[in-house]
Image: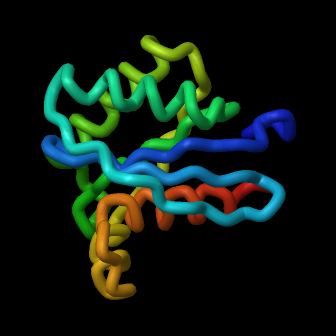
Amino acid sequence: MVPPSQASFLAFDFGLKRTGVATGNRLTRTATPQPTIRAEGDARWAPVQARIQEWQPDALVVGVPFHPDGAAHDNTRRAQRFARQLRARFGLPVYEVDERYSTTEAHAQGARDADAAAAAIILEQFLRGLS
């Protein structure tokens, strides 16, 4: 259950080399892609922190990929680890969203930055599920 006081969100489509980012809010239930973070390992934390400081979200959303049959794989665990690290580093609530096919959908929509578009798709899916 997401408390009504959480109205603004920053979403991440985690990747080893690129992490898509999107902002959105509960009122409009829409998300806007932001420039993708192009950094690996610990180098990604400074730009993540900068985005959190810039947008001041109430909570964070992380897309977690699964196989089509719902089974977990290596990237599932990596994204879940990223979500845990976000919680620990920034003290914000973090919600995980099943993001199967978000990148495929972003490509199908003709997105120039598929990672950012996928983050927006993930966030809009999350926002649609709020009551």
Q: Is residue 67 visible?
A: yes
Left of 26 or right of it: where is 12? Answer: left
Q: Is residue 130 above or below residue 121?
A: above
Give the quarter of the image for residue 94: top right
Q: Position of residue 91 (x, y in %)?
A: 56, 14
Q: Is residue 120 above or below residue 80?
A: below
Q: Position of residue 31 (x, y in %)?
A: 60, 61
Left of 117 or right of it: where is 23? Answer: right
Q: Is residue 14 above or below residue 31?
A: above
Residue for point 33% across, 71% down: 101
Residue for point 57% across, 64% down: 125
Q: Position of residue 102 (x, y in %)?
A: 37, 68
Left of 129 or right of it: where is 115? Answer: left
- Total numbered labels placed on residues in the image: 0
Residue placed most toward the observer, 114 or 4? 114
Q: Is residue 75 visible?
A: no
How is this picture coloured? rainbow
Give the quarter of the image for residue 47: top left
Give the quarter of the image for residue 128: bottom right
Q: Is residue 98 above or below residue 49?
A: below
Q: Name the quadrant of the C terminus.
A: bottom right
Q: Name the quadrant of the N terminus.
A: top right
Residue for point 43% across, 13% down: 89
Q: Position of residue 97 (x, y in %)?
A: 48, 50
Residue for point 50% across, 46% down: 11
